[in-house]
Image (spheres, helix red, strand yellow):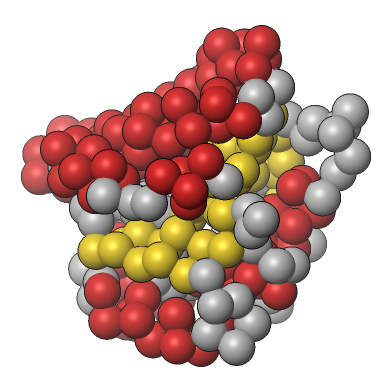
Amino acid sequence: MVKYAFITGASSGFGAAIATSLATEGYGLILTARRLDRLVALKETLAEVSPDIIIGAVDVRDRLAVNQWVERLDDVVKQNVSILINNAGLAAGRAPIDEGLVSDWEQMIDTNLTGLLNVTQAVIPWLKMRNEGHIINITSIAAKEAYPQGNVYCATKAAVDQLTKGMRMDLLPYGIKVSSIAPGAAETEFSLVRFKGDESQASAVYQGFTPLDATDIAEAVHFIVTRPPHVSIHDLVIMPAAQASATLFKKD
């Protein structure tokens, strides 16, 4: 029977790369994101590698929509989900706390924290039925240390870091591993979203050094989920060689 990996934010970046990696390992995929056209394209790309791909345009912020969509999944699929990758997340804007937009704060809190909770609570019963499974939360170096004008984004990722630890304790009796991956600077659509489509601002973030890319994180996920049953990777921080902290870089 095919085992399934449920991946949020799968339309691009880390999510798409993780989906590609796990498909080559023989996993069926349950892929969600807001951009259905991107998911359709990804499914077509991976069809030869993994014929078992389910896609859905789901906004993780909408608890009712999440619950309704997962309820429609076939029971056989639910019973064979063994991995949940909570990847959906974003940064919106960058400003001093007194100048931040409330709409940006709400978007980050609702996506990065509440959205993760919505999906996790929907999927955990399936893992508990199996008495095994693995949840991986994609956080950020911002979960470990704040940086100027990153206030609310850093807070949401720090909250997920603590939530990961609590989940690990709560799910230990059920044989469910819980891990987190905290990437440093990675060139995906992250900065383009943060700066609301300003390509010059987004590209400037990665100038003068070689950042991580999505495949680096996908390889880390592959490493974590292929450890022997008695091994659990709790927390993995992955940085570009040119980055020593959230704000310290060696640039050309």
Q: Quadrant of residue 44?
A: bottom left
Where does the image place residue 74, in percent across and percent down from the top left?
A: 38, 51
- Is residue 60 among what the camera can see? no
Taking the image as drawn, is residue 163 in sight? Answer: yes
Q: Residue at 44% across / 80% down in the picture?
A: 43
Residue 83 image position (x, y, % from top left):
59, 45
Tell me: 151 left or right of 106.
right
Residue 31 figure quarter = bottom left
Left or right: 232, with 70 as reference point: right
Classify residue 133 as left or right of residue 97. Answer: right
Quadrant for the C terminus in the image: bottom right
Quadrant of the frame with the N terminus: bottom right
Residue at x 67% of width, y 30% of height:
132
Residue 215: percent from the left, percent from the top? 66, 71
97 or 59: nearer the viewer: 59
Q: Is residue 239 above or below residue 119?
A: below
Question: Is residue 44 left or right of 226 when viewed as pictured?
Answer: left
Q: Residue at x 70, y 67 (%)?
A: 26
